[in-house]
């Protein structure tokens, strides 16, 4: 039995449509099953505002082909001298197709010594991941990676 | 007479087994099919999520429970010594029950009979933690061949279960895991199905799980009716799988996709 | 289950950049999964992680449902003086967990 959050919108609408005809289903909320590139862009806009978003300095390390979207190792590193005058203030990671565009925000400082953070993330589908670093001088730098996510071959009963 | 039967059954099982089993030299752990990132997750004890359960299991090992108010440690002392090698030779024959039991069942037998405490539910956090802690003490040791003649009929049954076609897809475990390992199914490599690292942290589950859980998941996946937790069939299958993996090192807690 | 695996070097030289790795158990329920009956399983995640070095914050993270269960974090800091790293995880439903690890800096 296909689990609900893996259905496409079309499948969902079809199912709810036919159920409604049968009078079997009560009110159903229609919400996008996943974020859209528009949500990603507006999340990035919220962070960056009108400032230019430059590419460079940021390296986003994610395996291009992921064994399991539930636990994807990710490392973000930013080239920076990490001195009191020139350091990475924060790193923000976004995605394109999960239900929400946010993955994590990481706050550093000159004491960090190296601007590098690693964690494990969930990716619901093959999609773009974007990492944005905010520097001490207020500038924003970004990198993005397209990740291919495959699902486990056999589904399990809940 | 029973001995003769046992010997014949054992011989048959051994003879039959050689016909289709993966030869020792070609046995490969699921580890070898994984991406470098997943391997790295397993290799480092401070980043292997399964170790969280091993740590918890150690705490449970030392905690008195039940009306007998005894901890595992009270009888078994230091697990690094007393439990070393145990997981490598389980499932094992239980004299009183007259059949093999797996490690989870052995733990529950100890709990109910010696600690006078209620049995732990299958796949419960505490049972997984304790099983992981105990199995971890065998990490690096080779899985022992099944030599106990009393286990012969159960081993034969387990092998039968592995070889029998079942379910809507009419597939036997052997079809994928003996015949088609290293080929791909929906983008993922088919492994040999060796039980070297259980209980293991499966990325798909995002938690630790037992061999029983994995078998039930696989059997459900081929659209067959999975055996219940604690059923003799699962133990027989586990016994056969361990026998099929003899010589391979225990990896508990393994990480797998 | 309130356990964490911490990896901090026990000793370092002043000025060394050291890696700190933490792994804690938490289901990180995203709030999008449903039971077989169709009910949403409510969100239950760690929302924030903070590391303090002798009392001063050196690293902080906002975590979202996109962070995997049993969250793992690796970050760096400059070893300046001997003392303690304090770690704190805060999350939904009043979740709060702390841990600490010492370091000797010569």
Image: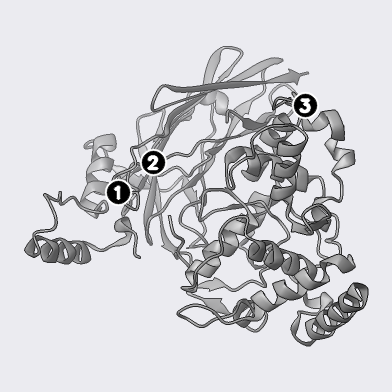
Using the image as rendered, state which of residue C51 and residue B215 is in the foreground: B215
* Residue C49 placement (x, y as % from top left): 48, 27
Specify few, some or many for label 1: CA neighbours under 10 Å numbering under 14, 14-19, or 20 or more: many
* Residue B236 placement (x, y as % from top left): 71, 66
- Answer whether labels 1 and 2 touch (C-beta < 8 Å): yes
- Answer whether labels 3 and 1 touch (C-beta < 8 Å): no
Q: Examine the rendered structure and indicate whether residue B87 appears above or below residue A65.
A: above
Specify few, some or many for label 2: CA neighbours under 10 Å numbering under 14, 14-19, or 20 or more: many
State the SS at label 1. Answer: loop
Using the image as rendered, state which of residue B11 and residue B186 is in the foreground: B11
| Residue that badge 1 annotates | A99
Using the image as rendered, state which of residue B38 and residue B232 is in the foreground: B232
Q: Chain of mark 2?
A: C
Question: Measuring 53% from the left and 40% from the top, which residue is drawn there?
Answer: C70
Q: Examine the rendered structure and indicate whether residue B25 appears above or below residue A19.
A: below
| Residue that badge 3 annotates | B70
Question: Measuring 65% from the left and 66% from the top, which residue is drawn there?
Answer: B233
**Residue B130 position by quadrant:** top right
Q: Chain of mark 1?
A: A
Res C65 label: 2
* Residue B214 placement (x, y as % from top left): 58, 60
Q: Is residue A74 left or right of residue A1?
A: right
What is the spatial separation of the Cα atoms under label 3 and label 1, in whole angstroms? 48 Å
- Is residue B111 in view? yes
What colouring style does the render use? one colour
């Amino acid at each position: 039995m296909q689990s609900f959050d893996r259905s496409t919108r079309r499948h969902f609408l079809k199912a709810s449509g036919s159920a409604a005809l049968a009078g079997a289903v009560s009110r159903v909320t229609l919400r996008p099953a996943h974020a859209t590139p528009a949500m990603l862009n507006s999340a990035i806009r919220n962070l960056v505002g009108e400032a230019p978003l430059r590419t460079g300095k940021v390296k986003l390390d994610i395996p291009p082909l992921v064994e399991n979207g539930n636990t994807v190792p990710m490392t973000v590193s930013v080239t920076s001298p990490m001195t009191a005058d020139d350091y990475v203030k924060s790193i923000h990671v976004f995605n394109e197709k999960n239900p929400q565009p946010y993955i994590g925000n990481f706050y550093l400082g000159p004491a960090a010594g190296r601007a590098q953070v690693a964690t494990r993330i969930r990716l619901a589908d093959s999609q773009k991941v974007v990492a944005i670093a905010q520097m001490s001088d207020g500038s924003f730098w970004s990198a993005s990676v397209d990740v291919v996510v495959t699902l486990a071959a056999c589904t399990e009963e809940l | 007479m029973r001995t003769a039967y046992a010997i014949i059954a054992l011989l048959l099982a051994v003879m039959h087994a050689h016909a289709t089993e993966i030869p020792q030299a070609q046995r490969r752990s699921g580890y070898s099919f994984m991406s470098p990132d997943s391997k790295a997750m397993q290799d480092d004890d401070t980043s292997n999520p399964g170790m969280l359960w091993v740590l918890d299991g150690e705490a449970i090992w030392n905690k008195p429970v039940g009306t007998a108010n005894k901890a595992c440690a009270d009888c078994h002392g230091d697990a690094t010594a007393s439990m070393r090698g145990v997981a490598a030779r389980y499932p094992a024959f239980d004299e009183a029950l007259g059949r093999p039991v797996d490690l989870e069942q052995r733990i529950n037998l100890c709990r109910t009979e010696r600690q006078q405490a209620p049995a732990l539910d299958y796949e419960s956090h505490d049972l997984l933690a304790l099983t992981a802690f105990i199995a971890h003490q065998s990490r690096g040791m080779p899985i022992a061949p099944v030599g106990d003649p009393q286990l012969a009929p159960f081993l034969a049954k387990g092998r039968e279960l592995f070889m029998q076609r079942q379910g809507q897809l009419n597939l036997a475990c052997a079809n994928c895991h003996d015949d088609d390992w290293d080929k791909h199914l929906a983008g993922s490599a088919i492994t040999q199905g060796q039980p070297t690292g259980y209980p293991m942290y499966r990325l798909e589950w995002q938690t630790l799980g037992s061999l029983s859980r994995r078998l039930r998941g696989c059997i459900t996946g081929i659209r067959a009716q999975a055996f219940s937790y604690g059923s003799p069939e699962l133990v027989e299958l586990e016994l056969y799988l361990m026998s099929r993996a003899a010589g391979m090192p225990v990896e508990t807690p393994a990480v797998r996709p | 289950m309130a356990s964490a695996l911490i990896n901090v070097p026990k000793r370092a030289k002043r000025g060394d950049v050291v890696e700190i790795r933490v792994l804690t158990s938490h289901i990180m329920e995203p709030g999008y999964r449903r039971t077989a009956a169709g009910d949403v399983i409510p969100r239950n995640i760690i929302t924030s992680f903070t590391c303090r070095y002798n009392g001063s914050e050196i690293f902080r993270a906002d975590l979202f449902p996109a962070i995997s269960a049993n969250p793992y974090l690796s970050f760096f800091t400059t070893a300046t003086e001997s003392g303690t790293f304090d770690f704190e995880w805060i999350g939904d439903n009043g979740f709060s967990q702390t841990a600490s690890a010492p370091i000797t800096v010569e």
